[in-house]
Image: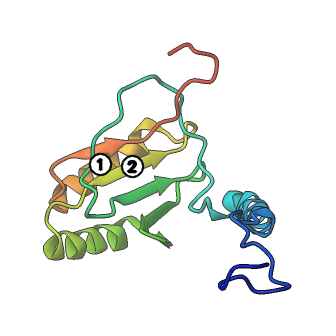
């Protein structure tokens, strides 16, 4: 004789969660991100000098202005996702406009190792005349551990 709450033909509830579909979705997302991550690196192809130094702390709320100088001496300005090729005068005008809107925007310079020292000095002098008080120089860490 069965109890009053027993239903004939019903199974016991299962206490497990099937995670196989979740794992399949995660693996697909992993493959997608592995393929697209190298494509997200944008900007100008610059061969940075390799030196060992401490990283500069920048405020997280503003994107830095990154000015790149390629091996041909061309200037490029990156702000967030946007990278544009500019002359030195156009770059100075844009920096002035950006600093008027957001005064404490950090400015970083990425110079190719094959660019002449004089060209970087001219760039930094132009930035100083545009109202930039501090300029950060970007470099890559040494690959062989020497610095």
What percent of the width, then of the height, locates residue 104?
Answer: 16, 60
Residue 110 numbered tag: none
The residue drawn where x is 15% and y is 50% is 133
The residue drawn where x is 33% and y is 63% is 63
Residue 109 numbered tag: 2
Per the image, label 2 sits on a secondary structure element best described as strand
Q: Residues within 10 Å of mark 1 (few under 14, many from 20)?
A: some
Residue 95, compared with residue 37, is above or below; it is below
Residue underneath mark 1? 124
Residue most toward the right? 9
Of label 1 and label 2, which has the lower sequence position? 2
The reply to whether discs 1 and 2 touch (Cβ–Cβ < 8 Å) is yes
Front-lying residue, 84 or 64: 64
Front-lying residue, 112 or 26: 26
107 left or right, relative to 37? left
Residue most toward the front? 1
Per the image, label 1 sits on a secondary structure element best described as helix
Q: CA distance from mark 1 to mark 2?
A: 8 Å
128 left or right, relative to 34? left
> Which image quarter is the N terminus in?
bottom right
108 left or right, relative to 1? left
């Amino acid at each position: 004789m069965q109890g009053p709450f027993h239903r004939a033909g019903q199974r016991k509830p299962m206490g497990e969660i099937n995670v196989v579909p979740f794992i399949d979705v995660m693996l697909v997302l992993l493959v997608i991100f592995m393929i697209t991550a190298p494509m997200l690196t944008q900007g100008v192809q610059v061969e940075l000098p390799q030196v060992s130094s401490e990283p500069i702390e920048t405020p997280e709320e503003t994107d830095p202005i990154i000015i790149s100088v390629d091996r041909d001496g061309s200037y490029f300005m990156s702000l967030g996702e946007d990278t544009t090729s500019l002359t030195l005068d156009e770059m100075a005008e844009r920096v002035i406009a950006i600093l008027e809107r957001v005064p404490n925007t950090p400015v970083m310079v990425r110079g190719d190792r094959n660019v002449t020292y004089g060209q970087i000095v001219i760039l930094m002098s132009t930035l100083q005349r545009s109202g930039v008080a501090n300029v950060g120089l970007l470099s890559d860490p040494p690959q062989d551990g020497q610095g």
